[in-house]
Amino acid sequence: MAPPATPPAPASPPAASAFAPLTWGDLLKRPRPVADATLSYGAAPEQKVDVWLPDRRGPHPVVVMVHGGCWQTDIADRTLMDWVAADLRASGVAVWNIDYRGVDRPGGGYPGTFRDAAAATDLLRGEAKRLNLDASKVVAIGHSAGGHLALWLAARPRVPAGSVLRTRDPLPVAHVVSLGGLPDLEATAASPDNGCGTDVIARLVGGNYADTSIPRLLPLGVAQDLVNGREDRIIPFRMATDYVARATTAGDRATLHTVANTGHVELVTPGTAAWKEAKRLTLAALGVPDHARDTAR
């Protein structure tokens, strides 16, 4: 597969700050790790899942991973998450790295993008035994627009009856880690300062917020960790603070983790403070030790 197109580059921070954010080029120039298998859940080129399997005895704890890219395939695909997927694999966690049709692909938008994310995730249940995966406690990790979709996967039992997105017995998600996510689609559509712009929301949902925007589906009934940087010039920081306040008021356990000197790319770059925090939260949610750290001792 060709590498994803370069996503929007974070703008430079204010002159008063000495922090220089990472760019997508900083990540993409690293040697690219390789997944262990690729599965299809449909006929479209984007309807794929990459599977990353630890070199350990299973059954493996598993993360469902969702890439960002402003819900647009031309900006990013699942391969943008290769580096953090490999890092989790080295720590003893299997990764179910899903792809989906963006709004710029035939069949993408509403309901296709959401149906793709759901079908890709539900495929895990049918493949778990063959791949020696423990699907009893799944953590979903999403970056940027993928943070919204990761939360939406956890919210699927809350989708209203009668919605075209309602499915029977969706794969349960026990915990969500959102990395610079955009949970509130209505707030995003009203925020010209977000790096995805506002028009993309109309292309994504066409005004169908009741079954797609996370605040409309609260409470989710699962723990949620949001990892964000104040220096993120793609996702305004208030997107995290406002959502956490609404989720907490609704009765959910939602926690914001603010990481210093963190832009948008740091959130999915191994070795950064932001990714270390995201991985720590993920491993804690799964209840597993960091085998990569244990090996390094």
Image (cartoon, rainbow, N blue to C red):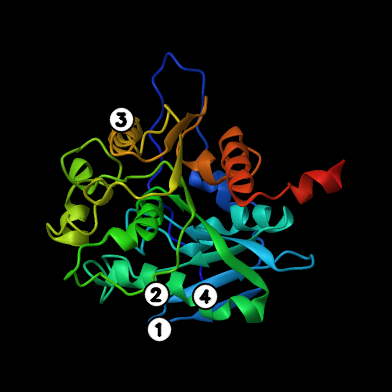
Decide: is 231 above or below 286.
above
Q: Is residue 1 visible?
A: no
Amino acid carrying label 4: it is Arg
The numbered mark, 1 or 4, whose residue comes first in the sequence reads 1
Decide: is 8 above or below 164.
above
- Measuring 51% from the left and 70% from the top, which residue is drawn there? 2
Depth check, mark 3 against mark 2: the one in front is 2
Distance of label 4 from label 2 (alpha carbons): 10 Å
Amino acid carrying label 1: it is Gly
Q: Which residue is mark 2?
A: 119
Picture coordinates of residue 108 (x, y %)? 27, 70
- Measuring 37% from the left and 41% from the top, which residue is drawn there? 252
Q: Is residue 158 visible?
A: yes
Q: Which residue is mark 1?
A: 42
The numbered mark, 4 or 2, whose residue comes first in the sequence reads 2
Q: Which residue is mark 3?
A: 238
Picture coordinates of residue 208 (x, y %)? 14, 59
Q: Looking at the image, do the residues carrying marks 2 and 1 touch, with CB atoms under 8 Å apart? A: yes
